[in-house]
Image (tube, grey):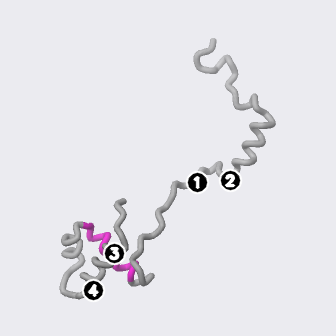
Amino acid sequence: MKFFSSDFRDKIVKIYEKGDTSIRKVATRFDVSKGFVQKILKQKQTTGHVQPRKQGGSPKSVLHSLTTELTHMVEKYPDSTLFPSSIQPGFK
């Protein structure tokens, strides 16, 4: 998603709040989507500002909470992570 500055977002809100235009016309004027204009207008109404929200990160792995436990298991039983030579690729 493209990042838009707070100043740019404020301009969009100010133009719309003048009352002589539609969301669709504002979106066309600023070359953004209608949904983006709707989103920042709603954000302004609910939070009182239009600053960009924090971007989401990637979801945590299911095993993330078990990292310490898995590390200890591998340290205690290092051979358990190896394939048996009979089924390891490239070995006969």
Question: Is the C-beta separation of discs 1 and 2 under 8 Å?
Answer: yes
Residue sitting nearer the eye, 49 or 71: 49
CA distance for labels 1 and 4:
40 Å
Please state the horizontal and vertical placement of residue 46, each as a whole percent of the image: 43, 83
Label ID, residue 10: none
Q: Earlier in the sequence, mark 4 or mark 2?
A: 4
Question: Is the C-beta separation of discs 1 and 4 under 8 Å?
Answer: no
- Which residue in the protein does label 4 denote? 17
CA distance for labels 2 and 3:
40 Å
Q: Earlier in the sequence, mark 3 or mark 1?
A: 3
* Residue at the top extreme, as displayed: 92
- Mark 1 residue element: loop
- Mark 2 residue element: helix
- Which residue in the protein does label 2 denote? 65
For the point 34% across and 67% down, the residue is 4
> Crowding near pointer 1: few (<14 within 10 Å), some, many (20+)?
few
Q: Earlier in the sequence, mark 1 or mark 4?
A: 4
| Part of the protein shown in magenta | 32-44
- Which residue in the protein does label 3 denote? 7
